[in-house]
């Protein structure tokens, strides 16, 4: 991706905050205001938006209370612990527990407005590169969000699709760096590999990965506090030991991810004729009941199977809240809280050759064995420890068949 394209996304990011406020009815988006902003004058502190959508979804369980008030109270408390978008921080109790490995120097470099201090080091990287799609809060509600398919991810859920760890584990730093470096083909998520080509920007990707970890930890703590308030009536206090334990548990799960990576066996080396035989065997596994690939991806891998479903980001505020995402009359009641139109998480059309998690054989092996968390794509049954399923050799056959569908497209 060119620097010009990166600059374009950065320009959109500058507008994102005003778009968010306009959506909330707090501010009129005027040319004069944009001019003041672009020339660098005026207030630069962009507040983290409370998680009203998640709160409103949970409130449908009880029906008591005002979602916006509960969301605002939780947001205010989390801000006392984790700071603001200009001045992120970590709570003392988290540091004292020794279970947060966030590199705050990198986090601070990515936060705040875009610019340089006397040291000439560029800062505000998240607003420059990411906020136009993912929003200031990492909520996936940036200026361009409603125009994209799929929608940008909401980091606050703590769920990430393309990673090297099993379901229930967080991605590693390397996983996030891989996504930032390679992008996600077939989506609006670009590759930022161009940043590594110059000495000035060579550390930007790893710093951005750290900031995403910060946003995810902060956002998931906020979600869990909201759930505790609604379901158990927990008091929101920064000194509440139970509330502190929530934050500690969330941060600990990110630490654990580094030791939970899937070990991918070495891919087999085949002659041309042996590869053809492997592909033929893989086609049989693709069509088998054991893998059920055909149900979603269709008999020819075109993504046109009978089973079509929504991802967990959508189910979070629809199905789990008792709302049918197929009925506009039902889901539109959530629009005032920031809901976008529910869209089906379409299975991959392999003929497009756009493998979102990477197109190396090892990448596809991981996707098959681990599944894609947050989506209808489940992990494949793997024959290990006496469990029924495919052997590693058979999984490689399936990988080769899926790749052949792309080459034939």
Image (tube, grey):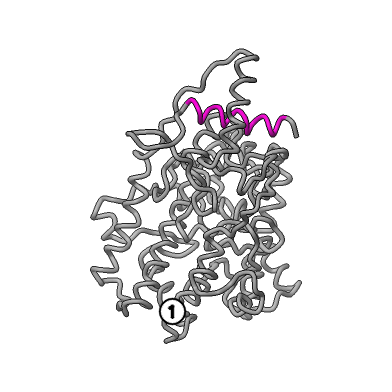
Q: Quadrant of the N terminus?
A: top right
Whether residue 269 is situated above or below residue 393 in the rendered picture: above
Whether residue 227 is situated above or below residue 308 in the rendered picture: below
Q: Is residue 229 left or right of residue 346?
A: left
In front of the other: 281 or 260 = 281
Report whether residue 208 is seen: no
- Percent x, y for residue 212? 49, 52
- Percent x, y for residue 252? 31, 52
Rendering quarter of residue 359: top right
- Percent x, y for residue 335? 62, 76
State the predominant SS element of the stretch in magenta.
Answer: helix
Q: Would you name the residue on which mark 1 appears?
A: 61
In front of the other: 225 or 200 = 225
Q: Residue furthest front?
A: 289
Q: Is residue 261 left or right of residue 335?
A: left
Is 403 part of what is drawn in magenta? yes
Report the span colored magenta: 393-407
Q: Is residue 164 left or right of residue 355?
A: left
């Amino acid at each position: 991706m060119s620097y010009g394209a990166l600059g374009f996304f950065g320009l959109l990011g500058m507008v994102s905050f005003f778009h968010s406020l306009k959506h909330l009815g707090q501010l009129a988006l005027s040319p004069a205001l944009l001019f003041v902003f672009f020339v660098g004058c005026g207030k630069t502190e962009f507040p983290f938006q409370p998680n009203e959508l998640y709160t409103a979804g949970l409130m449908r369980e009880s029906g008591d209370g005002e979602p916006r008030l509960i969301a605002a109270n939780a947001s205010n408390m989390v801000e006392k612990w984790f700071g603001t978008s200009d001045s992120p921080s970590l709570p003392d109790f988290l540091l004292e527990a020794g279970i947060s490995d966030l590199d705050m120097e990198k986090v601070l470099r990515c936060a705040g407005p875009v610019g340089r201090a006397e040291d000439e080091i560029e800062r505000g990287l998240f607003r420059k590169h990411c906020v136009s799609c993912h929003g200031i809060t990492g909520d996936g509600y940036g200026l361009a969000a409603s125009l994209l398919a799929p929608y940008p991810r909401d980091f606050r859920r703590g769920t990430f699709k393309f990673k090297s760890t099993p379901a229930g584990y967080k991605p590693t730093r390397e996983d996030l760096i891989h996504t930032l470096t390679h992008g996600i083909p077939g989506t609006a998520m670009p590759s930022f590999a161009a940043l590594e080509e110059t000495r000035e920007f060579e550390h930007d990707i790893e710093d951005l990965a750290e900031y995403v970890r910060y946003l995810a930890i902060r956002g998931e703590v906020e979600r869990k506090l909201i759930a505790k308030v609604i379901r158990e009536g927990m008091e929101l206090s920064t000194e509440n030991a139970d509330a502190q334990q929530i934050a500690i548990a969330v941060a600990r799960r990110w630490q654990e991810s580094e030791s939970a990576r899937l070990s991918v066996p070495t891919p087999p080396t085949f002659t041309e004729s042996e590869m053809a035989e492997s592909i033929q065997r893989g086609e049989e596994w693709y069509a088998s009941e054991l893998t059920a690939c055909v149900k979603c991806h269709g008999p020819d891998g075109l993504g046109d199977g009978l089973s079509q479903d929504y991802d967990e980001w959508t189910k979070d505020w629809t199905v789990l809240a008792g709302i049918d995402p197929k009925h506009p009359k039902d889901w539109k009641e959530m629009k005032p809280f920031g809901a976008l139109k529910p869209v089906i998480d379409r299975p991959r059309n392999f003929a497009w050759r756009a493998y979102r998690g990477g197109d190396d054989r090892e990448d596809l092996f991981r996707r098959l064995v681990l599944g894609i968390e947050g989506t209808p794509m489940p992990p494949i049954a793997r024959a290990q420890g006496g469990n029924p399923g495919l052997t590693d050799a058979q999984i490689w056959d399936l990988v080769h068949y899926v790749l052949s569908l792309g080459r034939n497209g």
